[in-house]
Amino acid sequence: MYDTETREAIGTLAPQIDAGTATQVWEKALAVPWTGEPVWFHGDVAPDNLLLDDGQLVAVIDFGICGVGDPACDLVISWTLLDRPGRGAFRSLMAADSAMWARARGWALWKALITIVAPGVTPSAAAHAVAVVDQVLADHAGR
């Protein structure tokens, strides 16, 4: 569903990102489709949708994108909020095999790319999205 816009964004950003690795991440995500039973997902587990009390997660809000399907989309928070050690700890606690993790990387890449190329994107949102792309590509490369 997001293939065309993802590839177009990779092409547009080729001077700024490692387009070859971004394409590898995207194609790997597409190569391992969700084949399990559909499950409920939030769809936008993002820092702004998490409520904390004294550093502890107490609620997840904003269920406007909630649906049924592949839960990998909810793992995007691994790249939008967590650093490499945090991502490793999070992954070890999740029931996420390598296929789910690859799809999650694809979701994170797609969202970051479309944010960067979005008309009127704020400089801070674009900078955060660029950092997410960098983390996704590094994670894919094992760095």
Image (cartoon, rainbow, N blue to C red):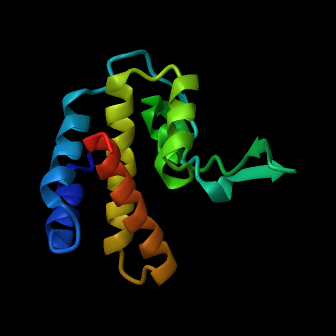
Examine the rendering and report whether any part of residue 43 can be seen.
no
Residue visible at 34% across and 64% down in the picture: 114
Figure quadrant of the N terminus: top left
On the image, the x and y values in percent for residue 24 come to: 16, 44
Residue visible at 24% across and 27% down in the picture: 32
On the image, the x and y values in percent for residue 62 come to: 67, 51
Examine the rendering and report whether any part of residue 46 can be seen.
yes
Residue visible at 71% across and 49% down in the picture: 61
Residue visible at 47% across and 49% down in the picture: 79
On the image, the x and y values in percent for residue 98 come to: 34, 24
Residue at the extreme right of the image, as rendered: 54
Task: Please state the total of marks drawn on the protein image.
Answer: 0
Figure quadrant of the C terminus: top left
Q: In this view, does 64 lie to the left or right of 116?
A: right
Write down the quadrant of residue 111 in the picture: bottom left
Between 132 and 26, the residue placed more toward the observer is: 132
Residue 38 lies, with reference to residue 25, above or below; the image says above
On the image, the x and y values in percent for residue 7 come to: 17, 57
Between 83 and 22, the residue placed more toward the observer is: 83
Write down the quadrant of residue 105 in the picture: top left
Residue 142 lies, with reference to residue 12, above or below; the image says above
Residue 113 lies, with reference to residue 82, above or below; the image says below
